[in-house]
Amino acid sequence: MANVVVVGAQWGDEGKGKIVDWLSEQADIVVRFQGGHNAGHTLVVGSNVYKLSLLPSGVVRPNTLGVIGNGVVLDPYALVSEIERITGQGVEVSRKNLRVADNATLILSLHRELDALREDGAPGTKIGTTKRGIGPAYEDKVGRRAIRLMDLSEPDNLGPKIERLLAHHNALRRGFGLPEIAEKTIYDELTGIADKVLPYQDTVWRLLDEARRAGKRILFEGAQGALLDVDHGTYPFVTSSNTVAGQAATGSGLGPGAVGYVLGIAKAYTTRVGEGPFPTELFDEDGRLIGERGHEFGTVTGRQRRCGWFDACLVRQTVRTSGIDGIALTKLDVLDGFKEIRICTAYDLDGTRLDHLPASQGAQQRVVPVYETFQGWEGTTAGARSWSELPAQAIKYVRRIEELIGAPVALLSTSPERDDTILMHNPFED
């Protein structure tokens, strides 16, 4: 029996919500280990649709504990708002099904304001952030000036911590020509929400270690995608955290030996939200049709996603950087009816053939995809729950993807409905 890590194998929005929900039925604990409320996913459970950002997917399922790990940056006001929204949909959220790491870094209003100032006023290239304060909060974390959840339980000791934080931020604000923030403003912001979030506080590393030793099944739920990793993604057009599978250990407090099967999620095509390189992006009717059929709009921002053909070079790269054991391939049904389908198998960089995306920003902008063209299939894959229901050409397409990325397809999703899934390998039984 293995603990399972779920990570996006592209630029996010791969359909992790459905897969995590499908797996969470077998899990005792679901853990968020990085990111913040910039990461959105949609769960469709029966006739109910839940849009989550901070809350782990397990909270909507009875008898499953949701955990927000120390690797997450936590906006306490956003957390309370999301809890209230989910509660309004009939989901009870209490300490019984939600715990938050006491050493999680908090996102404050000054982080959100700084994020927006930089994104809107940057003289250089825009990154495409969600302006929710994620990056500035991570900066304060590594700068050793962050306010953490545990600090809210000791309001008498907040003064020096706020003073240290504002010594940095007020200097930045002066540079932007903005008024300084008073210590009392931050103090009131923190104490005003403390009573609503502290009930969920826990020593998460110990909680998870005890659960692991007791044989509990733990599902680690990644946010965004591996290509947005601050080290291994398309830097600087990335998020501010590590999104690869290795972060599941660091961001939860469990050692790497507790991480078992790594399941990567990838669409049968490629999408990206925001700025940055995208070698297989389509600007023609095919790209428009993929976006329309796939309903490609961001869960959190509502921004339209850029669409393109499946990039096997990129997914092969993330298979290696995340140690992916198997892939859950989603949205195959979106490609139904195309006469021709293309897969990127390599890149051409100034006359040199490459099998990976180079780290250089300039080179990433210059690579030209080398395609392999497939005949499309007649009929539909939508709603298929067995291989026998798939057109032969669709099976051929999936098998070729497996060959090119160097990993088997463990799950195949053929619609947003959780039961429209073809299972080849159960990650929890690895």
Image (cartoon, helix red, strand yellow):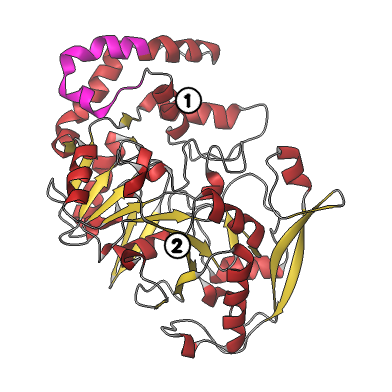
In percent of width and height, residue 339 lies at 70, 82
Please state, as top left, top right, bottom left or bottom right, where the C terminus lies in the image: bottom left
| Amino acid type, residue under disc 2 in the picture | Gly
Q: Residues within 10 Å of mark 2 (few under 14, many from 20)?
A: many
Q: CA distance from mark 1 to mark 2?
A: 30 Å
Relative to 395, 250 lies left or right? left
Relative to 139, 282 lies left or right? right
Give the residue at x 47% y 44%: 243
In percent of width and height, residue 373 lies at 74, 74
Task: Say which element carries label 2.
Answer: loop
Magenta-tinted stretch: 146-164
Give the residue at x 13% y 48%: 94
Give the residue at x 34% y 62%: 43
Q: Nearer the viewer, residue 27 or 77?
A: 27
Is residue 425 in view?
Answer: yes
Is residue 181 in view?
Answer: no
Q: Is 339 situated above or below 108? A: below
Give the residue at x 19% y 38%: 206
Which mark, by number, is residue 80? Answer: none
Q: Which residue is mark 1?
A: 114
- Dot placed on the residue nearer the N-terminal end, 1 or 2: 2
Q: Is 380 situated above or below 352? A: below
Numbered marks: total: 2
Please tell me whether residue 154 belongs to the stretch shown in magenta: yes
Q: Nearer the viewer, residue 423 or 428?
A: 428
Magenta: main secondary structure equals helix
Q: Which residue is mark 2?
A: 15
In percent of width and height, residue 1 lies at 28, 62
| Amino acid type, residue under disc 1 in the picture | Leu
Q: Is 391 situated above or below 71? A: below
Task: Say which element carries label 1.
Answer: helix
